[in-house]
Amino acid sequence: MKFAQSGLFIVLFILFLLFVVYQIILDRSEPEYEEEIISERVDTVQIHQPALLYGFPADSFTVIESTIRRNQFLGEILSEYQVTDQEIHNLSIKSKRIYDVRKLEARKKYTLLCTRDSLPRAEYFIYEPNAIDFVVYKLKDSIEVSLNQRKIDTVNTAVAGIIETSLWVTMSDAGADPMLIHSLSEVFAWQVDFHRDLRVGDGFRVAIRREVRPDGSVRPGAQVLAAEFINQGRMYTAVRFVDPNGKAEYYDRDGESLQRMFLRAPLEFARVTSRFNPRRFHPVLRRRTAHLGTDYSARTGTPVLTVGNGTVTRAGTWGGYGRIVEIRHNSTYTTRYAHLSGFGRGVRVGSRVQQGQVIGYSGSSGLVNAPHLHYEFLKGGRQTDPRLLKLPPGRAVAESLRPQFELQRDEVVPVLDALVVPDIFEEPTRVVEADLRSSAS
Ligand SMILES: [Zn+2]
């Protein structure tokens, strides 16, 4: 009886163990989604990488890598590898015009390519003053010195996600460079106001190109190749098209320009604190007055950008507006930027400004109780709510460039299409990043 009982106990214990293991496996299998995404989309373009070292076939040399010690002279390094004093002397003279050997610094990396003899003789001395440049001192036959640059690799990546708290948090969770948010807000500047239109549940899919330095670090500022942004249920697509002159612009899938005459907002990152409202209670005057503009909360000194090209018609102090810049864009539209702490460089009455140019810095001049930017949009001389405007679109891809546009589009859009933006209700904040292809270019 006792034996049967302990037998039952063992069986139950084994079942319990199996259950635990099963749970662990279940837990592990959760990132399946990510793997699935990756396997679907990884364009495994394997680029044959010959074992080149600074452009030399590494396996035909004895390679010695080291760093320069304090107070160590080149002669000291080279004389160990059968380089004569005369050659070292010639080298120091020859190097002067290209990269003087006396400029070699301690702790910097150098590489010696030596013959594969039992007594290796240095044929090349290569010095790296920084992560990009390298100097080749050729020692065999005749002495030659050349300054070279290592190639910067580009890596194409795609990122997708759902905004759960803020775009910044979502992007950071995706391991994306915060600069990418800036790039995205620029790409969609005409469609989505990144300060007032973003909502929890908005989704994005972005294909980006990153530049990777030879030391493996990523250069800040990824380039958006294509992007989709689902904002409040509406989807916007952007495809980067580089025309034969090398000029890059963003279009939608049909080749229509994403650019509009005006940016959606005069600040890069700020919160709207008061919208255009003809019947507002004024916080300072303590009575109902129309608020004929949009207020953005912004720390004093935040750069204020002109939303469009135009001519400065006012740059000075004007009653309750405090320091104000007024820009006339054309016969119909004018914009005003008030409560500034200062003006942008060269911004004075009569000067021309380009869309996105810094025309001033936010502050608290004039009739205010907290620093903010007061922005007005005037149509035909009357303040209007910029949210209600139907603004004229920019130019579409020229008919003659259509085939090139389609070629570039069809290369990158399928990448976006394959990225699944998870449903926020089923999969909260699941962000997927897939390395698509890395190539040396
Ligand atoms: Zn205001």
Image: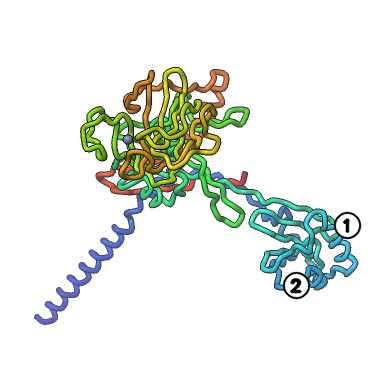
Q: Which mark is residue 72?
A: 2
Mark sitting earlier along the chain (1/2) = 2
Is disc 1 placed on a helix, strand or loop?
loop
How many numbered marks does the figure carry? 2
Rendering quadrant holding ligand 1: top left
Q: Identify the residue shown where x is 77% and y is 62%.
A: 125
Q: Amino acid at mark 2?
A: Gln
User: Foreground residue, 278 or 61?
Assistant: 278
Identify the residue under disc 1.
Answer: 142
Can you say whether 283 is above or below 81 in the image?
Answer: above
User: Foreground residue, 148 or 153?
Assistant: 148
**Where is the N terminus found, in terms of image quarters?**
bottom left
Q: Amino acid at mark 1?
A: Ser
Q: Identify the residue shown where x is 25% and y is 65%.
A: 20
Image position of 428 (left or right of 240): left
Image position of 203 (left or right of 413): left
- The single residue placed furthest to the bottom in the displayed view is 2
